[in-house]
Image (cartoon, rainbow, N blue to C red):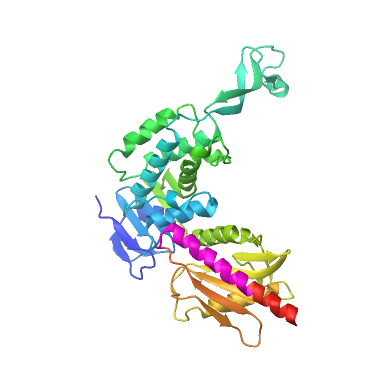
Amino acid sequence: MIEPVVLQEFQHGSEVRAIDQKTAAALAKTELVKVTPVSGGRWRLQTAGKVGSVRIGGLDVHVKPKMGISRLLFLLGYAKNPNFLPEDSPGTAEDDLWPALAESLVRYCERALARGPIRGYASVEATLPLIRGRILVADQIAARPGQSFPLEVRHDDYTADIPENRLLRTALRIMSEVPRLPDGIPGRIARLDAHLREAHCLTGTTSRAAWSLTRLNAHYGDALQIAEIVLRHQSAETGPGGLKVASFVIPVHRVFEDFVAMALREAFARFRVRVDDQVSGYLDEQRTVRIRPDVVALLDGVPNTVVDAKYKFQDKAGTNGDVFQVVSYCTALGTTTGCLVYAHGVKEAAWRSIRNSPIRVLQYPLDLTAPPASILRSLEELTERLLARLLQTVWLWLGA
């Protein structure tokens, strides 16, 4: 067994390991770490702005998130669905991503399936010796021209083979393939899989199951959220030379941007202010320099406040480049309020007044090691600060 490679997010150093070329190629393909040759069959492994775990053959590589695993899973869940409540984020003390994720998935699935799998009506196409539902005339002619039976039909069936159960079963099957599962987890996964035996697993062409939260599936909500995280970021496949590759790789900066956008959308909505994370435009009149801020708050459909989320440690220039960027966004969109939300490097909230310009930029820190409820409260406080700036701007305009 090769000793695991363990790196910390934002780590400046690297690990040098003797691994074969096929393993190095498979590891590079996962994009968890940068893989560069050194000499004598050795390779340098460095962090690449992502976190997660990869196992290739007997090699384990981990890049641990600075915020901790349970907080990372909370951000992943909330960024896609704000109904993923803070108290429902996995509270595990596991120091390894796969055991933590497996325990969370199994625990939520057990809770969801305590009363058995939910059932619903699903459209089924089948070949039957009798008429049931609707005859598929075109399919019948193509399959059996001139024959009356058997028939190609489509009918509704009351079944457990519905999107919610397919999603759960697929995630459990994927999780069963990963290494280092805690004792008891494989058996619990097998029991859950047996409960869901009527549901088909999703394939590569149907890797997403369309579902929405309703009164009937509300008790499935947390399990579905964790299952979607597994399907989005985890894979188990065969790499070069028949190597078994299991990976869970997360671009944390994108997760942070999505989380901030979702949390601000929820916070601003309480004040009936609409937030858009799809606003784009150009900085120059020639329309060659494109801009795409993370979040824009709109007042009566007009951009009012620009927010950009920054998940990084600062370089020697500090936050100067970030301020230039958000000032450019404000200028192009005709707003006077900008905000930079930092996960690292900024200790206190502070306004910056831009010389010869009405633009002001708020630099705002967000402590991702705090409990989820505190993180959300910090973003609510940020919303209140930005709204106070908005009111101040309106009063000055009315006074003029």
> What's the residue at 57%, 28% (across, down)?
120
Residue numbers of the magenta segment:
369-389
- Please state the horizontal and vertical placement of residue 322, each as a whole percent of the image: 54, 76
Kindly identify the residue that appears in the image at 43 percent across and 56 percent down: 72
351 or 333, which lies in front?
351
**Residue 74 lies in magenta, yes or no?**
no
Q: Is residue 159 above or below residue 218?
A: above
Residue 48 point in image, percent of width and height: 42, 64
Side (left or right) of 277 relative to 230:
right
- Quadrant of the frame with the C terminus: bottom right
**Count of number-bearing discs:** 0
Q: Please identify the quarter of the rendering in which residue 139 is found.
A: top right
Q: Residue at x 40, y 28 (%)?
A: 194
Is residue 357 placed above or below 102 in the rendered structure?
Answer: below
> Relative to 153, is 188 on the left or the right?
left
The majority secondary structure of the magenta stretch comes to helix
Closer to us: 138 or 248:
248
Q: Is residue 373 magenta?
A: yes
